[in-house]
Image: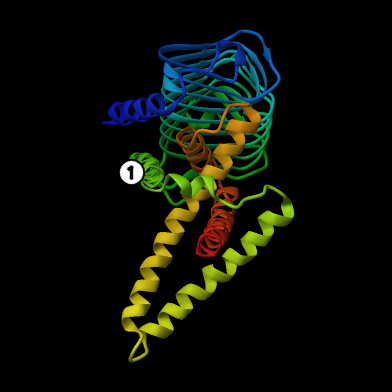
Amino acid sequence: MKKKIVSLLLIITMLVLPFSVKAEDNYIYADGNTAVVNNEEHNHSVFAAGEKVKSGATINGIYFGAGNDVNLSGKVSYGFLAGSSIIVDGTIDHDLFAAGGNITISKDAKITRDLYLAANDITIKSDIPGSAFITGSIVTLDNITVEGDLRVYSNQLIINDTANVKGTLYVSEGTIIKNEDKLTTGDKVLEKFTKVEFKTRIKDELLSILTMIFTAIVLALMFPKLFKKLDYELSVKDVFKKAFIGLGLFVIAPILSMLLLISNVGVVVGVILILLYILALMISMIMVSYVIGSNLYTKLFKQKDNIYVDLLIGILVVKVIELIPYCGVLFTMFAFIYGLGLLYRYVVKESK
């Protein structure tokens, strides 16, 4: 089932990626079989997708790699990886985000800051200078040192040789720790938190991504002018202005709906308003994904705007950010209210 879902995501990616991109552009590497990023220096972000994805290049920007087998052996500023099998033995100057079936961080890998992983089977053989947030069915730590905190949601935590967590180690309740005597946590204590069933969580996340991509594509097909006419300006003033409008709608709309529902004459209108409110929340996140994807694709990748590619990139980035503890919750709340502001400005503009 897992491989079918990953394959479906890959097929969708292949369908919407522009295969007419010139090789000399060096921003997107897409191939149905093997996508290899040129082993040279790239002073911009790079997106790669294929059945097999390999990169030994130096990328001074964000690297997005998605495929069945993904291997990162080069050097990148930030890494975002998704695949059935992921092997990292390169250098990440800042943070690494990876999700898939099996993930291996080899002994030769160098993670300069934080690590965020979600997979069925995870093996880490390289030291982590920052903190690590890991969700997996089986997590193996092989002779490593984590300078910061380590949070592990898993069924089984295996310690090979030794593992030293200088910060606080958090593990989910019910986690079986194998070779616990080889685990050192310094002056901190091992703390447990409520267990989250990994398979259920990863299945829900993949279903959420597929649902969002499908909904976005349907919206783009039915209303092709919707995204092109969005009134967005990526300045701090404009973003917070629309977020303020969205916050007002976020608070006022449900209150108004409840008042109408308890009145004698406004029940029908109240029900319609609630339905429109829920629909607006769903569309708002898709709009925010489009804004993010469009800016990444046109400004970082320097490509001609493509609605479907914009939506795909934006949705994947949004979903990865949502997985980040604490930051993901704050981002989601802000994205909802900003998206509502975007939708409000679009409706006002079209009604004139």
From the viewer's perspective, is residue 105 above or below residue 313? above
Furthest residue toward top = 39
Q: Residue at x 61, y 66 (%)?
A: 245
Q: Tag 1's secondary structure?
A: helix
Report the residue that reaches farthest toward the left.
Answer: 1
In this rendering, the count of numbered labels is 1
User: Pointer 1: residues within 10 angstroms few (<14), some, or many (20+)?
Assistant: few
Q: Position of residue 246 (x, y in %)?
A: 57, 64
Which x, y percent locates residue 330? 59, 54
Residue occupying the point 63% across, 60% down: 242
Q: Is residue 295 above or below residue 194?
A: above
Can you give x and y, in whole percent of width and height, for residue 199 in the image? 34, 39
Residue 95 at least partly seen? no
| Residue situated in front as seen by the camera: 99 or 49 | 49
Q: Residue at x 42, y 25 (%)?
A: 83
Q: Determine the residue positioned at 41% across, 43% down.
A: 220
For disc 1, the marked residue is: 200
